[in-house]
Amino acid sequence: MKNTILLGTRKGLIAYRNGRAGWAVENLSFEGQPVSIAYADPRTATWWAGLDHGHWGVKLHRSADRGKNWEEVPAPAYPEGAEITDGQPAATRYIWSMAHGGHDHHSRFWIGTDPGGLFSSHDGGASFQLVESLWNHPTRKKGWFGGGRDQPGIHSIVVDPRNEDHLHIGISCAGIFETNDGGKNWEVRNQGLRAEFLPDPETGVGHDPHILIAAPTDPDVLWQQNHCGIFRSVDGAGNWQEVSEPEGPARFGFAIAVADDDPEQAWVAPAHSDGNRTAIQGALCICRTDDGGKTWKELRQGLPQQHCFDIVYRHALASSGDALVFGTTTGNLFFSGDRGENWETLNNYLPMVYSVQFTD
Amino acid sequence: MPTVRFTYALKRFFPGIKDTPASGRTLAEILHEMETCYPGVRSYILDEQGNLRKHVNIFIDGEMIADRLRLSDPFRENSEIYIMQALSGG
């Protein structure tokens, strides 16, 4: 298990560290400011914070010393003339995802934004350029739309560790896109998904994958918690199979995590329907599958089971070895050291939690 | 020469920010000038397309500007230009 948990919250970046006395807050940065995502780059141990100032726009900061000092770097910016739709100028509205570019591309860094632009850096994050090939994809202006946010947004960036020019990204709402050449060309990978909120649920583009992840031990196994269920692919997103429970809670939600030693084991954080977006029957549970989604087990020990309204946002559930952590919309932070069988509360009084990440 | 005055909220990000005389002939020029005085401040006031951010207001001699897109509102030789945050959020 990694011994640091990095949180992006509505009122700052918070780092917990596991020591002799258990988990304790090591760092609080940007107190009072919304941190849309906090990300630690494992290659350099650099911490990144995407800030969503209500007044002053989206900002990007990085720290080389575990949050003691921060440097503001230029946030991803859309080039002059870029348009969301015809006549609607594009400007960065939100930083929604970050991913390092891999060990063969040591200076490469990816950022996904609302309104739908993917940005890459080739200088370690000192500057970012819009990935024009995706921005100019023929499906974008007519086939992408808002979901979760008012405009399309890129919330998932999955870099294949076997070939770091091979990426899958997740867009709400558009779906899954794949590149095999470092972002020069993109293919749609939505075969098998359903978009029940559209007149044609089997549309090519317009799906709402809430989050996309790959199994570290077999990157061809991809999982997504979709607006319309839980889906899994075993062929690198070529085909998706639904693995939701027909009756049980494992169906609607936002977050998903996969074990770092087993592509068949994954966790979801179920929520009550897109109409409600609350804990199901006032009780919080995490569901785990050990068999690739054929069956799901409800894990409730130590979690509130009445009068609870928490749900878990898409980046707010993470695993590391036997450890799991998740943060909720009402500011609770829960930890499990045994793959979700038992939970302990790390904090009941946090701001709304946007992201969690295990790091060293 | 007009004077630019900033909301106290910007002091958090630009600790040295203070009332600053400006010589630009348009509001857009003045904001460009402020960027020279306080590197990075322009991106806090305008987005990358040059539009005033949604929750930022600019007042010229107490009047809110009308043109948030092109920043063409006129001002006088001794005008006071206030850069304020809108009251929003929670």
Image (cartoon, coloured by chain):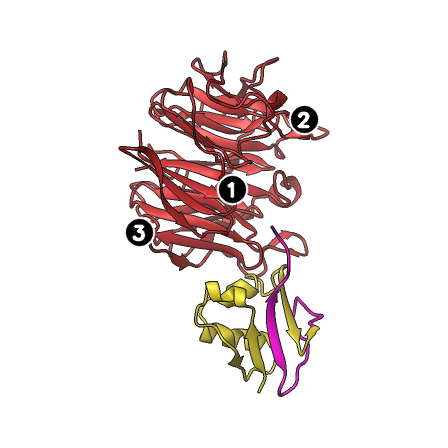
Query: Would residue A342 appear left or right of A22 to someone viewing this image?
Result: right
Crowding near pointer 1: few (<14 within 10 Å), some, many (20+)? some
Chain for numbered disc 3: A
As drawn, the label of residue A196 is 2
Q: Nearer the viewer, mark 2 or mark 1?
A: 1
Q: Position of residue A274 (x, y in %)?
A: 65, 29
Residue under pointer 1: A351
In the displayed structure, A352 sits above or below B24; it is above
Q: Which chain is red?
A: A
Identify residue type, mark 3.
Answer: Ala
Residue A63 lies within the magenta run: no
Q: Nearer the viewer, residue A200 or A343?
A: A343
Magenta segment range? B64-90
Task: Name the residue at 40% across, 48% down.
Answer: A28
Report the number of numbered marks: 3
Query: Would residue A19 appear left or right of B37 to someone viewing this image?
Result: left
Q: Check the picture and name the quadrant holding the N terminus of chain B.
A: bottom right
Residue under pointer 3: A64
The earlier-in-sequence mark between 3 and 2 is: 3
Q: Can residue A161 be seen here?
A: yes
Q: Which chain is yellow?
A: B
Q: Nearer the viewer, mark 1 or mark 3?
A: 1
Residue B76 lies within the magenta run: yes
In the displayed structure, A172 sits above or below A129; it is above
